[in-house]
Image: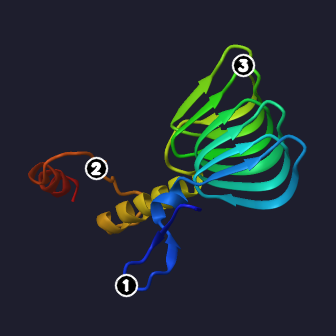
Amino acid sequence: MFNREKNEKTGKGRTSDANLNAAVTILTNGCQFTGKMYCRGSSRIGGKIEGQIISEGLLIVEEEAMISADIQAEDAIIQGKVKGKLAAKGRVELCSSGKFEGDIQTPVLIIREGAQFNGRSIMSLESEEEKKKSSTKENTSKVGALGDTKANRKVPVITETPAIELAEEAKSIN
């Protein structure tokens, strides 16, 4: 009755992973929620939410919705009012009725005519924390590879140069 499969050996029902991924979360107009909301599958929000939203699928913010939250989603379609931060792995679409105030991080941002966007957009897959970590690793590895920290010494710039050319350049510096 509720999309349950029977285990052939035990005869007991269990919900399949495919059914969990196809789950739909709906908060209609008139509903209010404060806190951390975790959704698996697609989500449609038409009410008022304050706090944090984590959606492992498509997040649809309906026209009547008023959201003040930090949001993480696979994809998002904004038709209502959102204030906060939105990080999406896929695309974000601000529809003509959508109003967004805050930061959006996504590789694909679509802003329809009539939509209002006041904030900052970051067009990348990598989060700011990951960027800081990778730049710190790069800086550390370059210093370690050169093995010399003297201020007056010339340091070669490492690019995609064959190893033989790098060895010759290192000899000329010494």
Q: In which quadrant of the rendered image does the N terminus lie?
A: bottom right
Q: Nearer the viewer, residue 169 or 81?
A: 81
Q: For mark 3, what is the residue?
A: 96
Element marked by disc 2: loop
Q: Give the number of the disc on residue 158.
A: 2
Q: Dot 2: few (<14), some (14–19), or many (≥20) neighbours within 10 Å?
A: few
Residue that appears at 40% across and 57% down: 152
Q: Position of residue 171 (x, y in %)?
A: 15, 57
Task: Tell me how far mark 2 sits from mark 3, CA to CA.
Answer: 48 Å
Q: Which amino acid type corresponds to the residue marked 1 in the rendered image?
A: Lys
Q: Secondary structure at mark 1?
A: loop
Q: Separation of disc 3 and disc 1 at Cα? A: 53 Å
Question: Residue 19 versus residue 34: which sits nearer the camera?
Answer: 19
Can you give x and y, in whole percent of width and height, for residue 73 in the image? 61, 48
Most extreme residue toward the left is 164
- The answer to whether residue 151 of the structure is visible from this angle is no
Residue 17 lies left or right of residue 155; in this view the side is: right
Residue 52: x %, y % from top left: 76, 56
The disc at residue 9 is: 1
51, above or below 93, in the image:
below
Please count the marks in the image: 3
- Please report whichever mark, 2 or 1, sits nearer to the chain's N-terminal start: 1
Callout in the foreground (3, 1): 1
Residue type at mark 3: give it.
Ser
Number of the front mark, 2 or 1? 1
Q: Amino acid at mark 2?
A: Ile
